[in-house]
Image: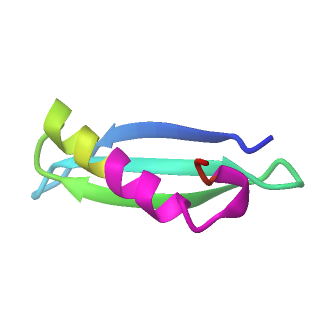
Amino acid sequence: MPWFGINDCYLKGPFGGVLLSVVELDGNKGMFHISFTMVEIENTNLWKLFLTLLRESLQSVPEWKDD
């Protein structure tokens, strides 16, 4: 069964922002990024956009395709 985790991380430094990311576990229980993006602020609209685009890209993976 596919598993992936969704997370955010506040970036420190001169530019700041928030890193939104999605990771998956592979067969050896190692993690790798499926998708990530940097945004200025974290809000509901940006999360919805990020997750909508993620869902559209995962439609090409047969195990995760919605029927």
Q: Main secondary structure of the magenta part?
A: helix
Where does the magenta region start and end?
Answer: 51-64
What residue lies at 25% left-to-right and 57% top-to-bottom? Answer: 38
Image quarter (top left, top right, bottom left or bottom right) of the N terminus: top right
Q: How is the image coloured?
A: rainbow
Q: Position of residue 3 (x, y in %)?
A: 70, 40
Instruction: Indicate left or right for 4 with 25 as reference.
Output: left
What residue lies at 58% left-to-right and 50% top-to-bottom? Answer: 23
Looking at this view, name the residue that lies furthest to the top.
Answer: 44
What residue lies at 44% left-to-right and 37% top-to-bottom? Answer: 7
What residue lies at 77% left-to-right and 53% top-to-bottom? Answer: 30
Q: Position of residue 45 (x, y in %)?
A: 15, 38
User: Depth check: 37 or 13 in front?
Assistant: 37
Instruction: Indicate left or right for 66 with 51 as reference.
Output: right
Dividing the picture into quadrants, the one containing residue 48 is top left
User: Depth check: 30 or 66 in front?
Assistant: 66
Answer above or below: position of 36 versus 51.
below
Q: Position of residue 66 (x, y in %)?
A: 58, 48
Q: Position of residue 14 (x, y in %)?
A: 10, 57
Does 62 appear in magenta? yes
Dividing the picture into quadrants, the one containing residue 53 is bottom left
Answer above or below: position of 44 versus 56.
above
User: Depth check: 36 or 2 in front?
Assistant: 2
**Residue 52 makes an appearance in the image:** yes
